[in-house]
Image (spheres, rainbow, N blue to C red):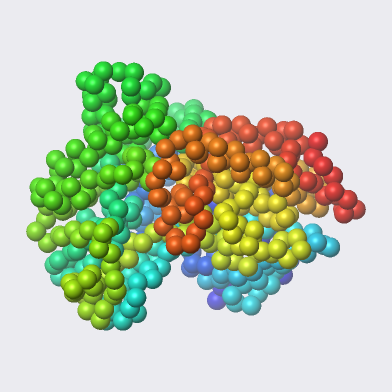
Amino acid sequence: MPTPIPSSVDALIVGAGFGGMYMLHRLRQQGLTCHVVEAGTGVGGTWYWNRYPGARCDVESMQYSYSFSPELEQDWQWSELFASQPEILRYANHVAVRLDLKRDMTFETRVTAATFDEASHRWTVRTDTGATVSARFCIMATGCLSTARQPDFPGVDSFKGQTYHTGHWPHEGVDLTGLRVGVIGTGSSAIQAIPVIAQQAAQLTVFQRTPNFSIPSRNAPMTAAYEQKWKSVYPEQRAKARISRNGVLTNPNDFSALSVSDEERTRILEERWASGGTVFMAAFNDLVTNQASNDFASEFVRQKILGMVKDPSTAALLAPKGYPIGTKRICVDTDYFLTYNRDNVKLVDVSKAPIEALTENGVRIGDTEYEFDAIVFATGFDAMTGTLTRIDIRGRDGETLANKWEAGPRTYLGLMTAGFPNLFMITGPGSPSVLSNMIVSIEQHVDWIADCIAHLVSRQLDSIEADRDAENNWVQHVNEVAFKTLYPSANSWYMGANIPGKPRVFMPYIGGVGNYRQTCDRIAAEGYTGFQLAAPAREAVAAE
């Protein structure tokens, strides 16, 4: 039986991933009553749900962990340079046990609605189990990639074999040994899963609409020397990460790709390629702002792909064209492109001749039917907004969040949205979130929210709400910064382009983790500029 939800708390937290776990810890320290509601059976968030073969973090292990506790930093030992999903989930559970978090968590329960009461300045939150809880603060720690995009092909329910989605992989695992398997999609999840599935399946057919740039991870076992190198300077390294561009220490070069000779440029790119991982994009300081510089890096990676894949026609299909490298999520892989050299792996291009339907036996394209025993949907997520807009969240005057965000998400700092007092979002749209080391951004948001709540409590203020003018200015700023880069030129999930009918709006903030942190800190130091604070007399007090 799930732990009962209290009928009334100071703060209700939705989601038990890294954001929800740390939020609970911080608010407990401040003496607040708080509770976490989680749809899954345990903690871990994205690392609880995404259990597909090969699932692995693309930020190296020594940087992808909490920094708020020196004890946790020093005690935990990673086994690989890039941690796998099972190990990250073990880490999440380790933290939950160390901090005794689960006693204030209810699992197997999904929040379905949250309604703000203007008279009491409290939220009434309802769940799919029928529980109702009154909360002064409602904090959405629902994650940016937590609502899977389910396939909508005609006949999707007619297939007689087994179907799986990478974002909702069976927890007991799947044995694909000796089966004919189809994988639909070639995004980050597929790029990690395909090499592992290919080793099991008798025949693997991959359906690709858009090829993706991917960099070899160069993953390896963690050595004691490398681990100690980090642990001996963790405070300094963490401080650097917090003011960096994306929350990851990548040893960036602070000069343009155009400022060096062809030979030097190639040497630097080769060096980054050999190092592995997303440090490749830090080879030059203008890869996402200068088309000519980006062209060099894009062509470099294309040539690497063409050199790895033996069949020229397959290689040509796998080499991305038509968008700059990095403007779709840059992927990190282990032997992805080499997998297409296997005799049991076939690539099918669906960019011009799309999948028409699923049949009883498999996938139909035109007059051709591909027969499978199992199909894996690697069709991604309704990123950043999907989980929030699926909850019936109602603010002032009964306005729903889904209606307010109909033309695209509108937030102030990615933390709050006007018309919804005391509703906080951890790594919401309009913040660096998915363009950063998520744990760095999570900790920054949680600390800001916790400090904000402490400010309200100490001054006996009832609520805080984003000002609409401040929100409008922030949305404008997020867009202006985005369009100074090459990012909007790609049809990416950053733009909502993977969801039919979703507004094409660049959702994360690309101005940098360090710059963003400075802005948030300044706004708080100035008394929460751009927010309206309400006193118990129900009289709005403008932030000084």
Q: Residue at x 24, y 72 (%)?
A: 363
Q: Nearer the viewer, residue 459 or 366?
A: 366
Q: Residue at x 18, y 47 (%)?
A: 316
Q: Position of residue 502 (x, y in %)?
A: 50, 59
Location of residue 390 (image quadrant): bottom right
Residue 315 in sight? yes
Q: Position of residue 139 (x, y in %)?
A: 64, 56
Location of residue 113 (image quadrant): bottom right
Q: Residue at x 15, y 60 (%)?
A: 346
Number of residue marks: 0
On screen, residue 49 above or below 460 = below
Quadrant of the snapshot with the N terminus: bottom right
Q: Position of residue 301 (x, y in %)?
A: 24, 38
Q: Nearer the viewer, residue 100 or 113?
A: 113
On screen, residue 407 above or below 8 = above
Residue 61 in sight? no
Left/right placement of residue 135 relative to residue 71 reads right
Quadrant of the snapshot with the C terminus: top right
Q: Residue at x 33, y 69 (%)?
A: 164
Left/right placement of residue 33 relative to residue 480 reads right
Location of residue 11 (image quadrant): bottom right
On screen, residue 528 above or below 6 = above
Name the residue at the right extreme: 537
Q: Nearer the viewer, residue 464 or 48?
A: 464
Q: Position of residue 48 (x, y in %)?
A: 43, 60
Left/right placement of residue 525 relative to residue 381 reads right
Left/right placement of residue 58 relative to residue 244 reads left
